[in-house]
Amino acid sequence: MRTSTRRSRRLVAFAAVAALTTGVLAGCANDSDDGSSKSGGGNGDGKGKTTLTIGTFGVFGYKQAGLYDEYMKLHPDITVKENVTTRTDVYWPKVLTRLQAGSGADDIQAIEVGNITEAVQTQADKFVDLGKEVDTSQWLDWKLAQATTKDGKTIGLGTDIGPMAICYRKDLFEKAGLETDRTKLAAQWKGDWAKYVELGKEYMKKAPSGTKYVDSASSVYNAAIGGETETYYDRDGNVVWDKSAGVKKSWNVAMTVATSNMSAKLKQFDKPWDQGFANGTFATVACPAWMMGYIQEKSGDSGKGNWDVAAAPTAANWGGSFIGVPTAGKHQKEAIELAKWLTAPEQQAKVFAKQASFPSTPSAYADLEPAAATTAYFSDAPITQIFSDSANTIPTQYHGAKDQPILSAITDIGILQVEQKGKTPTQGWDAATKEIKDVLGQ
Amino acid sequence: MTGSKQALAQPASSADAAPGSQPGAARGAHGRGAPAGADSWRSRLYRWDMKASPYAFIAPFFILFGAFSLVPLLYTAWYSLHDVQLSSLDRQTWAGLDNYKNLWASDFFWTALKNTFTIGVISTVPQLLAALGLAHLLNYRLRGSTVWRVVMLTPYATSVAAATLVFTLLYSWDGGMVNWILHFFGVDPVNWRESDWGSQFAVSSIVIWRWTGYNALIYLAAMQAIPTDLYESAALDGANRWQQFRHVTIPQLRPTILFTVVVSTIGATQLFGEPLLFGGVSGSKGGSEHQYQTLGLYMYDQGWIIGNLGKASAIAWSMFLILVIVAVINMLFTRRLRKSQ
């Protein structure tokens, strides 16, 4: 009897192990078609309901503005699910690998402007040509051009853009004895970021204690380069960052800031930067439209009515996104419809009303209404007017696949060394050069 | 069926049967009139089970190891000999040893290697010494000893991300608590993140904070296994507490200390999460002069931020080779120690 119980126990154990093993292996096998089963998952209930997934990063605002709910109400047979990854630098590598594996991608994938050129140049065949599906003339020319391949295929529809303005603390400006009127201020620095920096020297002469003129030299660089036609690549896709007039000009402006005492020396989107907003330790920041919500959140009540918005020295763009439909999706037709609807001017206006992400479709500008709270927070500044003026005159920029790492090398290596480690501008430039050569594999 | 296999199977089944009786007889006794065919099928199944089941038991590990470690390992080696970009994984062009040559000539690689080493030393050495001291204290009769032990293990139970975020705030240049305390001693605010030694010290302190308790507990367990008569005879010889610690505890702990050294060394070589999160935005650069970029961080930066997977794979394999070298040195060292004992 003992033999058989022991044997049966062993058999049970064996069966358990076998079950576990096959379970694990089956798990692996299932994983590969996870994406399609995810996007097709809605079919399971037998009512013909389709689940569309949309992959985004950061805060896109679609959910916050209630657009998914609205779409589902309009289309009762569709369920929309958003998969959010907070950080772009985590999101994008994941999307790249999934696109190339041909599975696992969402029905709609968001693409940040810093990655759009890489997507256009290397992933065009993985996306549906949306240019055939919509009236492309709705979008700003440069926005459309960014997502269009050389042979005219549009892989993504523009969502928001980042037209630039200068957000400034009226109360601090007054204490420092500077002009506080937004139109007069804009006139003082109009046309040149160097003039904006010059004003910083004025500010520092009578600066309220514990405050600086600007958050960081990198943010000035970022803003200035956003208004240049020539940045890191030329029209034909050659790397020209070391000869580029735009880079040189923006670098010099940033160097004036980095070598002076006007910078709070903060790193943008770091915790201390947030605290800087809360404590009012810097008086100005170059603010693209999407930063308005961020400032409101981080500055909180103490900043209410103290912040104001003036036009930036040059029309510049910083940030913005696209959404594309991967060809691997099971529900391409439905996904295209949703993408079209989400990027239509009316919907973009709704997102703007919710969180000030600025539309990339000019037809929406005429009756754009920011949230009442936003207007009040920024001293009743004519936000729509300022941003749409900027949006309409942003120059067309040429982009390249390694834009993002090159920018990061200049700001996080070059400028940071000068600003925080006391290196000379020449040393900073050399360090950035070395880094960029490494990035480009030269 | 060969004779030897049957011979192997026989003793096992006879061991299960009642002593002294023939295996066949034992079977027959509780055979419940089963036909001879079924019986031989059963015994064959049984024999098969005897031989196969050990393999089945260890199979899950090896299957998982193969699928998630060995295959990627070899694939990484293959990648490291090619030019592979994250954006075009399917287009791999043969590059031979170019990626390795590139690393050899790259200042960033050597900086990362040096950083990994220095951060490893300034995090591991104080950590193990402190752990030893703490374990020694905990080894005394204490009120509420369990509480102390649990408290010590708490840092180990917190996540890297949470711990690092808090430390980053403490070390913040402007308004951080560390600089605030230093100012009472007349020290000017230190830019912890951008200074060369400051940043390495800061990163190390996170590692020390998280792992000291864990090591202390391992030491404590080993200390409690030391027979008390050793201490008693040492005390009779007039040894004070410090002498007891030096001449009884430490020699007795030698194998345990070696174990923790090996484990900490491996941990230090793979250091990644702490410096990445300490750097905040674009933390993968490890500071504007790469002053705290470890090898793991350098690999991540090359592979996932810059998108050069071929080079990242070469870094991965270089790290592997470095670990092998470290392991060999460790082994020689251990053997030496054992011989001298």
Image: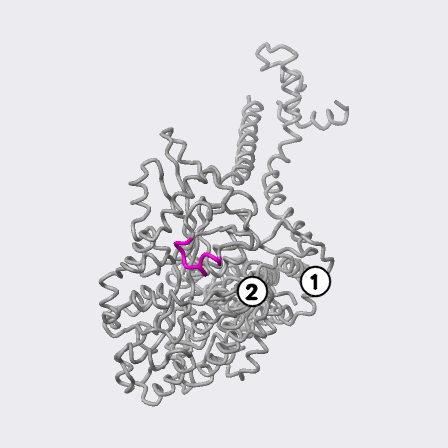
Crowding around mark 2 (Cα neighbors within 10 Å: few <14, some 14 to 19, many 20+) is few
Name the amino acid, label 2.
Arg
Residue A178 location (% of width, % of height):
29, 85
Vertical relation: A312 (above or below) A61 = below
Q: Is residue B257 magenta?
A: no
The number of numbered badges drawn on the structure is 2
Residue at 66 percent across and 59 percent down: it is B314
> Residue A185: horizontal and vertical position, in percent?
31, 80
In the orientation shown, which residue stands out farthest toward the right? B3
Q: Magenta residues: mostly which secondary structure? A: helix
Cα separation between marks 1 and 2: 34 Å
Q: Quadrant of residue B29?
A: top right
Determine the image quadrant of residue A201: bottom left
Chain on which label 1 sits: B
- Residue B279 appears in view: yes
- Residue A138 included in the magenta stretch of the image: yes
What are the residue bounds of the magenta stretch?
A: A137-146
Q: Which percent across, then down, holds residue A245? A: 53, 76
Which label is found at residue B193? none
Is B197 situated above or below B335?
below
Q: Nearer the viewer, residue A192 or B2?
A: A192
Asked which secondary structure carries label 2, the reply is loop
Residue B100 - label: 1
Residue B320 horizontal/vertical position (percent): 66, 58
* Residue that mark 2 sits on: A235
Nearest to the observer: residue A31 or residue A97? A97
B145 lies left or right of B216: left
Chain of residue at mark 2: A
Q: Is residue A381 left or right of residue B253?
A: left
